[in-house]
Image (tube, helix red, strand yellow):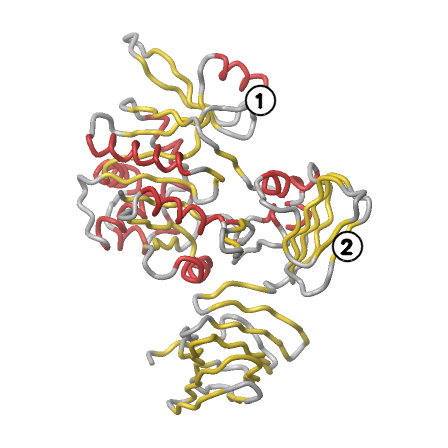
Amino acid sequence: MNIILLSGGSGKRLWPLSNDIRSKQFIKIFKKADGEYASMVQRIYDQIKTVDPDAKVTIATSKSQVSSIHNQLGYDVGISVEPCRRDTFAAIALATAYLHDEKQVPENEAVVVCPVDPYVDYSYFECVNKLYEKAERGDKNLVLMGIRPTYPSDKYGYIKPIKDEQGNAAYAFTEKPTEEKAKEYIEAGALWNGGVFAYKLSYVLDKAKELLGTSDYAELFSDYENLKKISFDYAVVENEKSIEVVRYEGEWKDVGTWNTLTEVMDENIIGNGRVNDKCANVHIINELGIPILGMGLKDMVISASPEGILVSDKEQSAQIKPYVDAIDQQIMFADKSWGTYRILDVEENSLTIKATLKPGSRMNYHSHEHRDEIWNVIQGTGKTIVDGMEQPIKPGDVVTMAAGTKHTVIAGDEGLQLIEVQLGKDINVGDKKKYEL
């Protein structure tokens, strides 16, 4: 089974645990049997591989999320990188062309497109597999998943059963109606549109030629910022007559706010936190190394990270986005392909970072034009390569790199932690030149 997972957005409604680099799908809040925590994308990837161990998964995402994907899923997953945001049709067309041109998937094969972040059970991907099989048969151009509504919501689109001009069964699509209209739709048999659809590659490649002028991956990628900005639903689904809908009856939740996310968490406290017995329906998610104590709280969420602290009524937590947009702050933490980093201190001419490398991983071999760097090893072993010279490192060692020096660090079998101090008058993420090692 070929699957494209759409992974976009900055997830600001889950601030301060999400930011422009670590979107909501990368927050580790689902406890596994071994006591470790998994993110939404890890949970969904595991579900796909459980249902179909041979599934070929490609993630359509922005460049800023690539490191997080490699960090959490490794390098076996395919990645279609969007140069910029151009809505879902361009993203899906690019990912489809990536499968065809880069991965050599024949255009008569089917693919299923799913969002990366719903909270679902394994039956969801069993239903996804049904969509794939139906698309493979090719009886209809497009196969959609319709989700059984549990209440009249104004947050989702609806798939409505209708009769066409010839009296044949057909479907109409409505974007986010009022609650009153949603109730009418549900009474008439409408289903939620969960953004899941299957098709043969040739179908979307032809649509790309028609609407974007080309289906060639290299051409789409190079001209991406100029492509028409339009949703897949509007460009394709609403104009397609040859459609089949597969009904899904299992668990499905959109967990895009703290209110909905806490509903599916296995425990009320993650990290260093505690509450007294007068608290009710309180969740604490703490990524800081300091304790959080809640007293006499009801229906509250407390979330803390290096980017800030949120203390909110759960219902009000869905409204935080405009307030977060008004906060002007640099990224304070991020996942990288080699591990994680966290900014400890920011001064006018210096930046102090704690970097944690996974066992056997390494940073890119790189240099900086406008800053010096100092690495102070605090845990683990490994080696550095500075201007071609290898040197083993252990806790207590200090490595200094002047501006222009090529350097990298490689973690040993137990991983590596170091404090990095950046010194210079122009410290910015763009000051980095990469080299082959």
Residue at 59 percent across and 82 percent down: it is: 424
* Picture coordinates of residue 145, whole percent (x, y): 37, 29
Is the residue 316 above or below the residue 346 in the image? above
Q: Is 222 situated left or right of 336 in this image?
A: left
Disc 2 or 1, which lies upstream in sequence?
Answer: 1
Instruction: Say which amino acid is labelled 1.
Output: Thr
Q: Give SS at disc 1.
A: loop
- Residue at 36% across / 19% down in the picture? 171
Which residue is denoted by mark 2 in the rendering?
Answer: 293
Mark 2: which amino acid? Answer: Leu
Point out the frontmost of discs 2 and 1: 2
Between 2 and 216, the one lying in front of the other is: 2
Q: Quadrant of residue 317?
A: top right
SS of the residue under disc 2: strand
Q: Residue at 72% across / 64% down in the picture? A: 290
Which residue is label 1 attached to? 178
Tell me the quarter of the picture where residue 422 sits.
bottom right
Number of residues whose C-alpha sits closer than 10 Å to that of mark 2, classed few (under 14), some (14–19) or many (20 or more):
few
Image spot of residue 16 (x, y percent)? 64, 54
Q: Quadrant of the C terminus?
A: bottom left
Marks 2,1: beta carbons within 8 A: no
Is 94 above or below relative to 395? Answer: above
For the N terminus, the image quarter is top left
In the rendered view, tell whether residue 164 sits above or below residue 398: above
Circle 1 packing at 10 Å, graded few (<14), some (14-19), many (20+), is few
The front one of 22 and 202 is 22
